[in-house]
């Protein structure tokens, strides 16, 4: 029996060399795959028998003996299947989310530990490296523009890179030829993974619940996040593996495993690497895939007024086919697509926001004043610190994912001999995502709230009479926002922002769409294009993140590669056509959970980043003198 479960595993695990580790991962993968196969077979057999039994019962007694119609048969097991799955997963999703968002004990207001870890970690790296987000910003621009390519080709120092082929490791003399994508392609791939529906929906909800002052804290957090991204992406390149075919494998899994081993902490590093990889796979299926497909499909169906039971399934199938064409080709194919999509979608969205700003130019002074004057009020503090980071990181693609470590996987594939060069390029990512794009969304929402537009939203989900009375009392008592659309800080049970006129609530995407539509009637169509592009780019980037983690767990075989991609594409269709809110909620929390193993690794390995930065800056200085 055990032989069936583990056949084709070459030899027992007796040492810690690389071949034995490859065998260990193969055995783990074999056991899991075969176990899942047997469980699926048993489940399928049980479901088939249940269907046969139900059919037999219906055909045996369709009508009572006295001619009276018999009771209607029980509904088939597949009726409302997504609702049943959602209900079954909900208790576990709630517990998992509560665990990830465990608050700091005895602290009021309640602040999750993960949130403090992100904020204070980013602040620590900013001070430790003497404000790299400001000092190295010009250098980062010049690096991504190719101004220092001559340093890569003729640098003063050679860096050692390990090409792993079984147990054999050899040093490549010129690491400049190692890697798969350029600096710009790596940046575009990482940006495409972070710039998603969180920039549209998450920011709108945060501003609606936290007020204009939330924008100030969003910018502050984005600037601090630049330092965290700089650290994790430098480490990603430093500890990456390049296999015998030149394919790069990198990310937190590798710098946790190898970096901790260098410091005599191998067992801890191995545990953290495994935990990160498992969480990253789950996050790629949910928040990086199913949620993106679900939101994009909902917007398409809504804006095009498509009706029919299979409409979402068809849209999901189309998304899966298009996504499949891109991800089958690996990181090079993904990078080629993202380097075209990311500039286009960013420019499209920013231009649309600028048009809205021009239409509301008379409110610009008021909006800027509100952003700063309300930044330190209790309402703005709650919405800005907890709302914009917690809500933004918890929803779809988080504001910039600094600290989660996911972007380090994409940046690891860059062609460079200097790891710090990509760390500097990576610090631009939170600036683009948060400081620029998220701030644009915030301004659009703030302007909209100054227009006194009379719009309708979705039905309120206020079942509690006391809650409804509280909301209506705030509507009446809010004299400060007398002419505004929203009452900041109010939302229903679904987290939707409440309209002050009492005509319902708006989701994050709905609020942003209403804001665009109030400025230019046909702008919601532009927003739909942006949403689809944001969702699509996020999905293809997260497919790579998940694949690298999957291969870390199960080995770098063709079977592992194809099995992950097939499952990933299935989740595109499932996410688009089903309403599995709790399933997506469960996997969304996995993205936040990535922070725990990753940030611990960043603290331990920070000194190595300092050495790599000095090596790169020295190479730039020497290369400049030679030229």
Image (tube, rainbow, N blue to C red):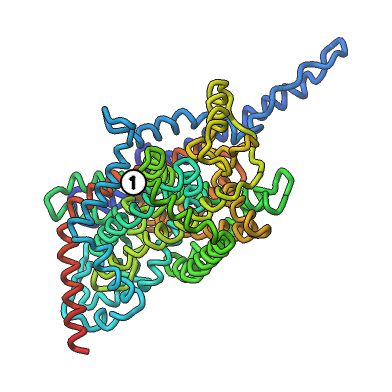
Position of 494 with respect to 596 (left or right) is right
> What residue lies at 55% left-to-right and 48% top-to-bottom?
449
Q: Which residue lies furthest to the right in this view?
A: 67
Position of 394 with respect to 293 (left or right) is left
Is any atom of residue 5 visible in this view? no
The x, y position of residue 483, in whole percent, is: 58, 43
> What residue lies at 60% left-to-right and 56% top-to-bottom?
516
Residue nearest the observer in this picture, 278 or 520: 520
Q: Circle 1: is it few (<14), some (14-19), or many (20+) Cα within 10 Å?
A: many
Position of 77 with respect to 399 (left or right) is right
Count of labels shown?
A: 1
Residue nearest the observer in this picture, 414 or 506: 506
In the rendered view of the protein, which quadrant contains the N terminus? top left
> What residue lies at 31% left-to-right and 41% top-to-bottom?
114
The x, y position of residue 219, in whole percent, is: 37, 55
> What residue lies at 27% left-to-right and 58% top-to-bottom?
227
Element type where label 1 sits in the image? loop
Residue nearest the observer in this picture, 80 or 47: 80
Identify the residue position indicated by label 1 in the image. Answer: 594
Q: Quadrant of residue 271?
A: top left
| Residue 85 position (above or below residue 424) | above
Position of 135 with respect to 542 (left or right) is left
The x, y position of residue 369, in whole percent, is: 43, 53
The x, y position of residue 526, in whole percent, is: 62, 61
Q: Residue furthest top?
A: 66
In the rendered view of the protein, which quadrant contains the C terminus? bottom left
């Amino acid at each position: 029996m055990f032989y069936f479960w583990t056949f084709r595993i070459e030899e027992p695990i007796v040492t810690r060399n690389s071949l034995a580790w490859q065998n260990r991962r193969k055995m783990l993968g074999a056991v899991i795959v075969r176990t899942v196969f047997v469980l699926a077979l048993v489940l399928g057999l049980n479901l088939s028998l249940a269907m046969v039994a139900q059919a037999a019962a219906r055909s045996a007694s369709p009508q009572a003996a006295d001619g009276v119609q018999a009771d209607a048969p029980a509904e088939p097991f597949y009726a409302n299947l997504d609702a049943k799955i959602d209900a079954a997963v909900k208790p576990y999703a709630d517990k998992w989310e509560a665990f990830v968002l465990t608050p700091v004990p005895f602290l009021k207001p309640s602040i999750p530990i993960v949130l403090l870890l992100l904020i204070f970690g980013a602040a620590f790296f900013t001070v430790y490296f003497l404000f790299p987000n400001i000092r190295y910003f010009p250098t980062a621009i010049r690096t991504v523009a190719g101004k220092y390519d001559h340093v890569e080709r003729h640098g003063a120092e050679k860096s050692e890179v390990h090409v792993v082929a079984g147990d054999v490791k050899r040093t490549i003399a010129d690491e400049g030829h190692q890697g798969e994508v350029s600096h710009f392609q790596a940046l575009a791939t990482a940006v495409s993974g972070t710039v998603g529906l969180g920039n549209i929906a998450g920011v709108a909800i945060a501003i609606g619940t936290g007020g204009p002052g939330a924008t100030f804290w969003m910018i502050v957090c984005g600037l601090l996040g630049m330092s965290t991204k700089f650290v994790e992406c430098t480490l990603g390149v430093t500890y990456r593996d390049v296999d015998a075919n030149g394919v790069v494998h990198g990310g937190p899994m590798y710098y946790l495993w190898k970096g901790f081993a260098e410091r005599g902490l191998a067992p801890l590093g191995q545990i953290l690497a495994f935990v990160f990889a498992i969480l990253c796979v789950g996050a790629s299926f949910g928040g990086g895939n199913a949620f993106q497909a679900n939101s994009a499909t909902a917007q398409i169906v809504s804006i095009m007024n498509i009706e029919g039971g299979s409409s979402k399934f068809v849209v999901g199938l189309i998304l899966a086919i298009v996504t499949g064409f891109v991800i089958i080709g690996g990181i090079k194919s993904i990078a080629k697509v993202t380097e075209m999509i990311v500039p286009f979608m960013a420019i499209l969205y920013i231009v649309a926001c600028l048009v809205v700003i021009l239409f509301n130019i008379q409110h610009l002074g008021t909006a800027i004043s509100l952003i700063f004057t309300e930044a330190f009020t209790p309402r703005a503090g709650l919405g800005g610190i907890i709302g914009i980071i917690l809500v933004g990181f918890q929803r779809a693609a988080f504001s910039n994912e600094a600290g989660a470590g996911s972007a380090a996987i994409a940046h690891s594939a860059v062609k460079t001999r200097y790891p710090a060069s990509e760390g500097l390029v990576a610090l631009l990512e939170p600036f683009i995502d948060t400081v620029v794009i998220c701030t644009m969304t915030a301004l659009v929402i703030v302007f909209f709230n100054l227009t006194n537009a009379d719009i309708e939203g979705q039905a309120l989900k206020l079942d509690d009479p006391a809650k409804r009375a509280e909301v209506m009392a705030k509507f009446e008592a809010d004299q400060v926002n007398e002419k505004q659309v929203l009452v900041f800080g109010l939302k229903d049970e679904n987290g939707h922002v409440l309209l002050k006129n009492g005509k319902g609530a708006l989701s994050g995407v709905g609020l942003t769409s209403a804001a665009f539509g109030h400025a230019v009637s046909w702008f919601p169509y532009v927003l739909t294009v942006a949403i689809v592009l944001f969702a699509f780019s996020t999905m293809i980037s997260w497919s790579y993140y998940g694949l690298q983690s999957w291969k870390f767990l199960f080995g770098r075989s063709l079977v592992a590669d194809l099995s992950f991609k097939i499952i990933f594409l299935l989740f595109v269709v499932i996410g688009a056509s089903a309403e599995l809110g709790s399933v997506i909620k469960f996997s969304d929390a996995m993205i936040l959970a990535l922070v725990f193993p990753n940030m611990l690794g960043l603290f331990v390995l920070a000194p190595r980043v300092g050495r790599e930065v000095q090596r790169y800056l020295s190479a730039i200085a020497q290369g400049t003198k030679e030229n």
